[in-house]
Image: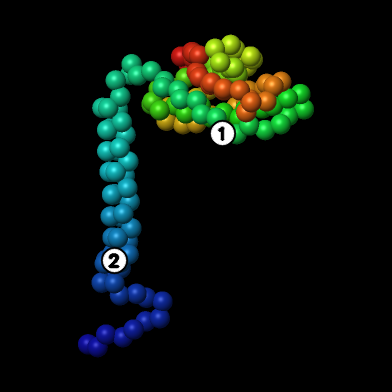
Amino acid sequence: MEHQHVPGRQDKRQDSRTPILEWIAAAIGLLLTLAMLGFISWQAWRSTGEELPAIKVQVQRIVPAADGWVVEIAALNLSAATGAAVQIEGELKQGERVVATSQVTLDYVPGNSEQRGGLFFREDPRAHVLEVRALGYAKP
């Protein structure tokens, strides 16, 4: 008997084989899933749960404002721990004398991230020594 091709009917042998692109997509999905699980496990193993926020404050730029000057700052959290209500202080000094002080509170500085804010001064910060630092934080 000769095999006749009937329209609309597919050869069963062709259905049972999985195309190579499906195997490649499945392998990529498996690798991504394993990589994600490995990364999460490594982070959990590395973290002690007692880590403290490590806030470093940097001046981004100084710009004129309506009533004086704004010192735009970036608070960099170099730790995996989150800090809430992070207080930042800026001082303008002339020698040892403090000419002006300004503070800002950043609501939330997640671990390994950056938040920005601004400090207002009536005097030009560029005419003085400007010191910025983190004063404290609260645990979220």
Q: Which of the 4 quarters of the picture holds residue 36?
A: top left
Q: Can I make out residue 134 in this image? A: yes
Give, as a three-letter code, the residue at label 1. Answer: Gln
Query: The residue tagged with tag 2: helix, strand or loop?
Result: helix
Q: Which residue is mark 1?
A: 60
Say the numbered circle drawn on residue 122.
Answer: none
Q: Which of the 4 quarters of the picture holds residue 8?
A: bottom left
Q: Which residue is mark 2?
A: 20
Give, as a three-letter code, the residue at label 2. Answer: Ile
6 over 57 or under it: above or below: below
Q: Which of the 4 quarters of the picture holds residue 28?
A: bottom left
Of residue 114 and residue 124, the one placed in the foreground of this image is 124
| Local crowd size for mark 1, using a 10 Å CA cut-off: few (<14), some (14–19), many (≥20) | few
Residue 114, horizontal then vertical, whole percent = 50, 31
Q: Residue at x 29, y 43 (%)?
A: 35
Residue 74, horizontal then vertical, whole percent = 53, 29
Q: Can I make out residue 84 in this image? A: no
Q: What is the C-alpha distance between the residues marked 1 and 2?
A: 52 Å
Q: Residue at x 32, y 34 (%)?
A: 40
**Which one is earlier in the sequence, the residue at label 1 or at label 2?**
2
Q: Is residue 44 left or right of residue 131?
A: left
Of residue 40 and residue 48, the one placed in the foreground of this image is 48
Q: Tell me the colour scheme of the image.
A: rainbow
Q: Hey, which residue is sitting farthest top in the picture?
A: 97
92 over 58 or under it: above or below: above
Q: Is residue 3 left or right of residue 89?
A: left
| Local crowd size for mark 2, using a 10 Å CA cut-off: few (<14), some (14–19), many (≥20) | few
Q: Nearer the viewer, mark 1 or mark 2?
A: 1
Q: Residue at x 33, y 51 (%)?
A: 29
80 over 31 or under it: above or below: above
Q: Residue at x 54, y 12 (%)?
A: 96
Residue 5, horizontal then vertical, whole percent = 34, 84
